[in-house]
Image: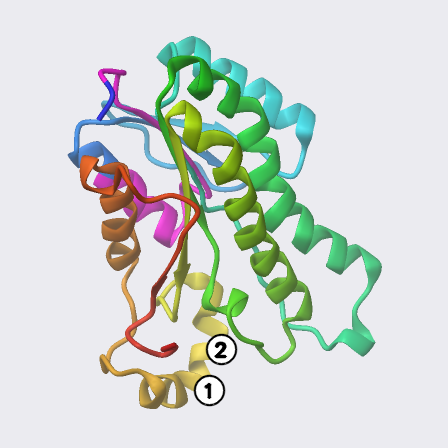
Amino acid sequence: MSKMRKTAVVTGGSGGIGGAICEALLEDGYEVAAVDVAGAARESDGLYFYRCDVSSFSDTAKVCADVLERFGGVYALVNNAGIQTHCALVDMTEELWDRTLDVNLKGAFCMCRHLLPSMLREGAGRIVNIASMSARRGSNLHTHYCASKAGLLGFTRALSLEAACRGVTVNAICPGIVETDIVRETLAWKRETWLDEMHVKRLGKPEDIASAVMFLMSEASDWITGQAFDINGGIITP
């Protein structure tokens, strides 16, 4: 790892997966800025909370400037903020479509746009985008969500080409069914179907995703960039 101070920004940092990522980073000695639109993360030694709508270019610019002033630089960015709603395309409003892509895809653009220049100047950094297995396959009533997460994979591949030659790696993780609030409603009727599809017969835990993020933060991942990792218990296989 670079001799840079271990500092990280995690969007959606007060949620299930985001919270687990923050905890894993803290345990590894990082100072962490948790960015979320609702619900404050519990601040502690090394953990700072910033309320922000990641789809707002101006709001993220202010937050990122504050974080850079506090930390003096950011080594790692985890774009985890995301929303999911259920709606058939024939019923979907323009507002619902736009809001989903604004949070899930534009949010990653906003955060990278404001923090990547600092990483490039330092010649070191890690960006991890949290996509979804829905970026790999269709999902009923989720055309907007699938489009946003598939877009995030394209964004990851393209940005890796710009950043790797200057010491910054960019990768994505595609979680399967992780037991968090975002899928709790669907789990009520689809749990057994999903479990039947999985090779590992359990739902994912937020810590499973956090472990993958930490691998991508480590020196062991120095030669990995532009990749998407499927962490899903085998529910999708090549």
Instruction: Identify whether 57 is placed above or below 15.
Output: above
| Residue 178 percent across, percent down from the top left | 35, 66
| Residue 95 percent across, percent down from the top left | 80, 55
Q: Amino acid at mark 2?
A: Thr
Instruction: Identify whether 4 is placed above or below 181.
Output: above
Q: Which residue occupies the foreground of this view, 41 or 164?
A: 164
Q: Secondary structure at mark 2?
A: helix
Q: Amino acid at mark 1?
A: Trp
Q: Please name the residue shown 38% across and 46% down the image.
A: 18
Q: Secondary structure at mark 1?
A: helix
Residue beneath disc 2? 186
- Inspect the magenta stretch and tell me whether residue 22 lies in it: yes
| Residue 73 percent across, percent down from the top left | 39, 15
Q: Is residue 69 left or right of residue 192?
A: right
Residue beneath disc 1? 189
| Residue 43 percent across, percent down from the top left | 32, 29
**Which of the 4 image quadrants contains residue 60?**
top right
Quadrant holding the N terminus? top left
Q: Please name the residue shown 56% across and 58% down the image.
A: 149
Q: Please name the residue shown 62% across and 57% down the image.
A: 148
Read off the magenta span.
3-24
Dot 2 alpha-carbon crowd within 10 angstroms: few under 14, some 14 to 19, many 20 or more: few
Q: Are marks 2 and 1 in contact (CB under 8 Å)?
A: yes
What is the CA distance from the residue labelled 2 to the residue labelled 1?
6 Å
**Which of the 4 image quadrants contains residue 184?**
bottom left
The answer to whether residue 76 shows anywhere in this view is no
Marks counted in the figure total 2
Q: Please name the residue shown 33% across and 90% down the image.
A: 196
What colouring method underlies this structural image? Answer: rainbow
